[in-house]
Image (cartoon, rainbow, N blue to C red):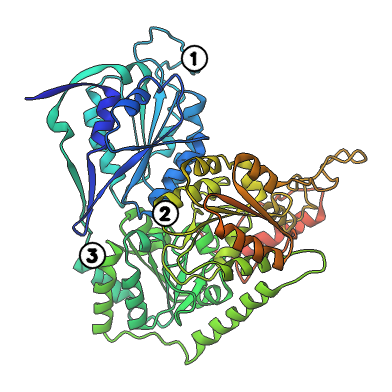
Amino acid sequence: METIRLTMAQALLKFLDRQYLSVDGIETKFVAGVMGIFGHGNVTGIGEALERQPGELAFIQGKNEQGMVHAAAAFAKQKNRKQIYACTTSIGPGALNMVTGAATATVNRIPVLLLPGDNFASRQPDPVLQQLENPSDYTISANDPFRAVSRYWDRIVRPEQLMTSLLQAMRVLTDPADTGAVTLALPQDVQAEAYDYPVSFFDKRVHYIDRRPAAAEAIARAAALAAGKKRPLIIAGGGVHYAEAVSELHAFAEALQIPVAETQAGKSAMPWNHPLAVGGVGTTGTLAANRLAAEADLIIAVGTRLSDFTTASKSAFRHSSVSFLNINVNSLDAVKLEGTGVIADAKLALPVLQAALQESGYKPAYKDGELAALKSEWDAEVDRLYALESEEGFTQTKALGIVNSFLGEKDVIVAAAGSLPGDLHRVWRVTQPKTYHMEYGFSCMGYEVSGAFGAALAEPDREVYAMVGDGSYLMLHSELVTAIQEGVKMTVVLFDNHGFQCIHNLQRGHGSEGFGNEFRYRSSSTGKLSGGYMPIDFAAHARSLGAAAYKATNAEELEQALASAKAENGPVLVEIKVLPGTNTVGYESWWHVGVPEVSSSDKVKQAHEQMQTDRKAARPY
């Protein structure tokens, strides 16, 4: 057997450089490169290998470990999980900074490969700098927290272990049903140890995603479930995009005349102006979708996790005999809400189910003009919100309307947390798939700027806009510097509403007077954070980093700022001062949060009683 002597780190990169993914006969190089921040735990191992033997792997220098994982996840999401970046860090704090990013990827079923440095396997210099010592279990390191947030985890304590571990890592990274974060903890001494690896281990490997067809019995059960149902509603999730089943979804809905609602991850599967598109569903849903969901007797959930926001904490579906038909490659999702599961690829399952339903003569019983009337009513509401003005300041929904009108059909927006996801899910109008990039599985503040960089890296021919609140921007904006460094064009649209206003609204809506969520000075008279708003100049901050920046306080200024930003060649920030509390809420939806049963406030106690009443409309499991 022919061998080649390499360090473990060199072998790791050589292997990653030779991995390919094949979907529908089209091969894609799976690992585009490595994002990294070096420290003593990886600079002389993986760092040396990247410097001298990177192969065709690109290296991108991250600025924050969490941020670069978000960027890698956004890249993979925008690529429909067909291509990834690996992420490497040192041990200790550098590694731990990636845990939130790992959880975000795993919750959203997005593949990322994490390569944190680890303690010395030999233990000779023990305890090494940044080592976490657990006196009851000395095998535990700062990388063990990744076990809880990874779909696959391993620690490579001998260089030859790498071979078995990498094959398992690739299994998970390329599995549509089981993907997420993969963490390989790499002791810093083992990274530099050499081994005689078989040359064949580095042959080109093609990982095939064979689309899973629906079993005939499953389709028969699905058709039987649909028989007699008069008011079906499709809920399109992110799996529609990942399976590249948008056209199949359209064909299915149009052939059977079934309205389509969307989750945050599924949005842009249907053009907003399609006659059967009723918009977002659930807690952040539209009035049209939520009314249809409440009266639906059949929910056809395609590629969705059916999270609490999608189901309005399981209160959205109120028909006494509602049933759930869940089409998903993941059996965990297929059984939710006691659903009849069709465990299959959506691209293959939808046409087969369509044929079965058509053969049986299935037809919904919506009244003539019913769907059109609901759509018309909601479109008028969006128009109202987009035109909404206040003498007190620039409203958030009007600002969104201006941005929406300015952007081109193929431009991509990226968002994640705060009040913007609710507004965007409800009122943002899209016509093209993959132009709405929302991380709402983990709703991770700080994803927006990093995610926009990753999305722009994935689609350099599109304009990419990060839609971010001031709170999220302050939490994590470091990869704006990386975008500047790499010359990647992206535009950060920053809505400055003076704090964490989404949670401030939630807080006040459940009995509080408002506490600890606005960016105010501490008052000398009350001792609380109740003084004036802090005047933060975000545009000046962006300029100090090297980005172009513009400000807007009204419609005219915003239109000019967007035009100026588009003309820039590199990263740019547009700061918009918006009036707090001018986001969208309600629309016959509900969200279950814990409200204290005991409080000194009568308003809190009343909110608790209302929550108990609302719970009665929700499914128990």
Give the numbered dot on residue 214. Answer: 3
Q: Position of residue 152 (x, y in %)?
A: 34, 37
Say which amino acid is labelled 2: Pro
Question: Which is more foreground, mark 2 or mark 3?
Answer: 2
Q: Quadrant of residue 235?
A: bottom left
Q: Quadrant of residue 198?
A: top left
Residue receiving disc 2: 460
Q: Nearer the viewer, residue 392 or 226?
A: 392
* Residue located at (41% from left, 18% from top): 119
Q: Secondary structure at mark 1?
A: loop
Question: Which is more foreground, mark 2 or mark 1?
Answer: 2
Give the numbered dot on residue 129. Answer: 1
Q: Secondary structure at mark 2?
A: loop
Mark-to-mark CA distance, 2 and 3: 36 Å
* Residue located at (15% from left, 23% from top): 4
Residue farthest to the top, as pictured: 124
Say which amino acid is labelled 1: Leu
Residue farthest to the right, as pictured: 525
Q: Position of residue 579 (x, y in %)?
A: 75, 60
Say which amino acid is labelled 3: Ala
Residue 21 vertical position relative to residue 335 in the rendered view, above or below: above
Q: Position of residue 452 (x, y in %)?
A: 50, 51
Q: Secondary structure at mark 3?
A: loop
Proximity of marks 2 and 3: CB atoms separated by less than 8 Å: no
The disc, 2 or 1, on the residue closer to the chain's N-terminal end is 1
Proximity of marks 3 and 1: CB atoms separated by less than 8 Å: no
Q: Nearer the viewer, residue 376 or 589?
A: 376
